[in-house]
Image: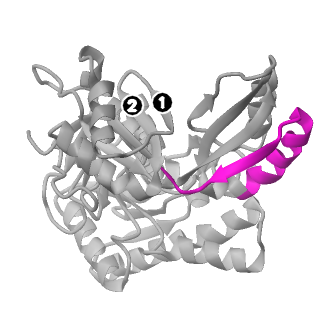
Amino acid sequence: MALIVQKYGGTSVGDIEKVINVAKRVIETKRKGNKVVVVVSAMGKTTDHLIAMAKQVSKNPSDRELDMLVSTGEQISVSLLAMAIHELGEGAISLTGGQVGIFTDTVHTKARILEIKADKMLEELNNNKIVVVAGFQGITIKNEITTLGRGGSDTTAVALAAALKADLCEIYTDVDGVYTADPRIVKNARKLNEITHEEMLELASLGAKVLHARSVEFANKYSVPLCVRSSYNTSEGTYIVKEMDVMEEPVIRGVTVDTSEAKLTLLRVPDQPGVAARLFNKVAQKNINIDMIIQNVSEHGHTDISFTLNRNDISRIKPLLDELVSELEASEVTIDESIGKLSVVGIGMRSHCGVAARMFSALAKANINISMISTSEIKISCVIAEKDASKAAQVLHDEFELDKE
């Protein structure tokens, strides 16, 4: 008998018919002799709808109240799924993150898991029930409801699998697995049978929407067997593994595009020691994640500092930057929300030179301009115009022949 954790995303439970189909799939897994824990996201666009309502009430709603609001979406999903399982003849119980015992820190809307109490889940599993858990949410030691950030249900599933020492964690979604690029924008994208934790973490953090980056971190840290597969068919999907047993790694494993970021620039900042530290310390105090950073060459004692962040954080950071313009004696702040972040990822880059040259040459031939560049050992990212994002992804996918095995 295996213990399996399954996670179903919002599109997989988008309406009642899909909820019933998920119930059938879960029951099929149980009747093969397995114990099953199911993590479910909010139905369809429920979370987006709830956030839109909040913005109609308040231009800048408090993070605590947002967590109170959006956490209700998952409660609808888990209760409906548990009812559907009951109706099909199996025992089930729905539980919120707090009822399960998913304890987090106190950072609302972006909480991190500190501890999971597995006793309640094990008790219900031993009573021959399917345990249905609300993804994306947790609770603080002071009983405050928190959420883990968009895509957090993936993290919930992998964290529960780690706490339960599950034999397998399956992430069910609306695609067949992990592809070399988003198949919706790259016509010849190819499904991968396997990919390493390291590569998947980079792809997830760079905009690949198939898995939440923190879920990959959990899987790597706690050695959770992880698989991404479709909720609409029975194909094998993609396994995320520690390392791959191949003679030589491909140079590039995948291409990603992220159009959820914006670029902010502080113009004519005094070029003095400590200025960047003051800027980014204040940003960190607001729990805002910064991605790419670039500082221009100093000219007449002044420089420009540009950085990227999620567009959803602009309203939170703008008042702070207005203060810093005055405090740092900068001239102004500019905000560009029409950017895309284009990236290539592959462990093979460690042993192959010339990847950057090929990447930038291909983009130049396609007349695509680059405004920022960031690199690591296994990835290269650049900021381009959002209007060029889909075209650029196809150009690089073709350049590195990712459609071939």
Q: Residue at x 16, y 59 (%)?
A: 32
| Residue 146 visible in image | yes
Label 1 Cα neighbours within 10 Å, binned few <14 / some 14-19 / many ≥20: some
Give percent across and percent down for residue 109. Answer: 65, 55
Q: CA distance from mark 1 to mark 2?
A: 6 Å
For the residues labelled 1 and 2, say whether their Cβ atoms are less than 8 Å apart: yes
Give percent across and percent down for residue 327. Answer: 91, 36
The image quarter containing residue 34 is bottom left
Indicate whether residue 335 is drawn in magenta: yes
The image quarter containing residue 182 is bottom left
The boundaries of the magenta stretch are: 315-340
Label 2 Cα neighbours within 10 Å, binned few <14 / some 14-19 / many ≥20: some
Horizontal side, residue 377 vs residue 237: left or right: right
Q: Amino acid at mark 2?
A: Ile
User: Can you say whether 277 is above or below 219 in the image?
Assistant: above
The mark that comes first in sequence, 1 or 2, is: 1
Q: Which mark is residue 146?
A: none
Horizontal side, residue 213 vs residue 142: left or right: left
Q: Amino acid at mark 1?
A: Ser
SS of the residue under disc 1: strand
Give percent across and percent down for residue 161. Answer: 39, 45
**Relative depth, front residue between 134 and 392:** 392
Give percent across and percent down for residue 179. Answer: 23, 49
Q: How many marks?
A: 2
Q: Which residue is mark 1?
A: 374
- Which colour assignment does the render follow? one colour
